[in-house]
Image (cartoon, rainbow, N blue to C red):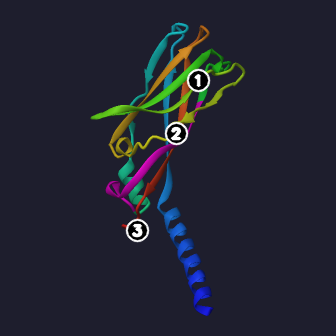
Amino acid sequence: MRKGIFLIVLMIIIGLSCKKASELTQFDMNYESKVSIPSSVGVNLPVNFPTPDITSNSESQFSGKNTSKDLIDKIALKSIKLSITTPESGNFDFLKSIEVYLKADGLDPVMIASKTSIPDGLGKVLELETSGADIKEFIKKDKFKLDVKTVTDKLITQDHELKINAVFFVDAKILGL
């Protein structure tokens, strides 16, 4: 009887220890970029807007978490938020749909987020739905870029500057754990 209780307690302790170790190997990486949507964009036409290159700094971020590129199991987009910085009166009422792709040298683009049927009245902030795609090969590169594809349903008379905040979830092995 005592052996049975001891084994159950031991299994619980091991299970909790494994969960704690797993949590230590998971962390977030934050990136910010900007994109401009010019006032001359046509209505109901798909248009691409690439961002400038984003330096990943992944080596230093991995090192700060006691891991390295070769110990990464998975990286996925956790959340992405777009905010209109200009014009002051700007809002997302002009958007019909949006898709965000991740691009890097030597890799095929991958859609990481989207939003379709965007309703009017959202204001200056738009959160997209993430795809869950494993994008570790992109983030392991020295640089990557986001390609924003939009379809508008209204004509805009002023350029719109957008700030993109992306949070990537990293699942890695720390010191080989």
Which mark is in front, 3 or 2? 3
Mark 3, residue position: 177
Mark 2, residue position: 166
Whichever of callouts 3 and 2 sits on the residue coming sooner in the sequence is 2
Q: Amino acid at mark 2?
A: Ala
For marks 3 and 2, give the CA distance: 27 Å
Q: Quadrant of the C terminus?
A: bottom left
The percent coordinates of residue 99 (x first, y second) are: 50, 26
Among the 4 quarters of the image, the one containing residue 89: top right
135 above or below 114?
A: below
Q: Residue furthest bottom?
A: 2
Can you tell which mark lies on residue 116? Answer: 1
Decide which of 88, 47 is in the foreground and name it. Answer: 47
Magenta region, residue range: 67-82
SS for callout 1: loop
Among the 4 quarters of the image, the one containing residue 63: bottom left
